[in-house]
Image (cartoon, rainbow, N blue to C red):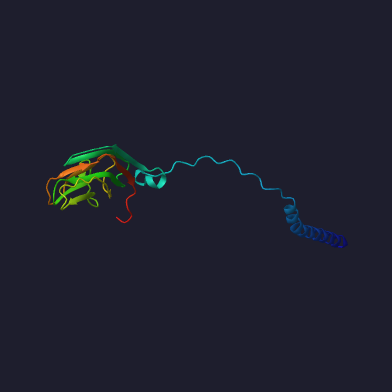
Amino acid sequence: MAMLASTVFSLGKEHLFLSVFAVSLYFVVPTARSECQGPQGAAGPAGPPGPQGNGTNATWYDISPRRNWKQCTYSHLNNGNDYDTVATCQFYKESASTTLFVLWGGGARICCCTGCCARWYFAFDGTECSDPDKIEGVIHMTNFGGADLHRHRTFQGYCNGLSAGWIDVQFKVGDCSGYGQSDRYTGWNSISRIIIEEVPASPYG
């Protein structure tokens, strides 16, 4: 019995020693670790490129910063057509779900008439835009039959519902509704341009 009591007492002292040692480590080790910490190392090398995204033609503008646009310029176009095509710019539309923005910038005038009107407009492969509507502008002259005023004009707009693929974007001239022929001139003595850009469809419909 005495030997058993001695053994228990001995084990008790050993357990007490281990408990005190563990408590000491809890307080001492973090302090030692913080005092021995070295300076922060340099940044590691860049990782490998990520995998290819899973975008589709319908969402190309969400995954690519690239913009699909084109500008056609015409030096001294000097086009005297009273009807039909003034200039054409070919464009490749990447998605059927997107919208085309088009702009004409250049000189245009009507002349030698009183109470006359001419209309400049965009067509796509020969057909005017219908969604949401035509892209056009008019020039009207009332009482200046002898005036020959070549002035810069800008006509622009958005067209929805155009198929993907190559499109002939045409800038044309013709009669205003309710008016007949007059003397028209486009792009006199200056640079004219057609600008086209494929953009995401409007979230407003």
- Residue furthest front as drawn: 146
User: Which residue is more in the foreground, 38 or 126?
Assistant: 126
User: Which residue is more in the foreground, 172 or 66?
Assistant: 172
The image position of residue 60, as x and y in percent, is 37, 44
The image quadrant that residue 111 belongs to is: top left
The image quadrant that residue 79 belongs to is: top left
* Vertical order, 42 against 20 (above or below): above
User: Which residue is more in the foreground, 78 or 89?
Assistant: 78
In the image, is 83 to the left or to the right of 169? left
Query: In the rendered image, which quarter contains the N terminus?
Result: bottom right
User: Which residue is more in the foreground, 120 or 96?
Assistant: 120
* Residue depicted at x 43% and y 43%: 53
* Residue depicted at x 76% and y 60%: 23
The image position of residue 120, as x and y in percent, is 21, 46
Query: In the rendered image, which quarter contains the C terminus?
Result: bottom left
The image position of residue 156, as x and y in percent, is 28, 48
The image position of residue 144, as x and y in percent, is 17, 50
Q: How many marks?
A: 0
- Residue furthest right as drawn: 2
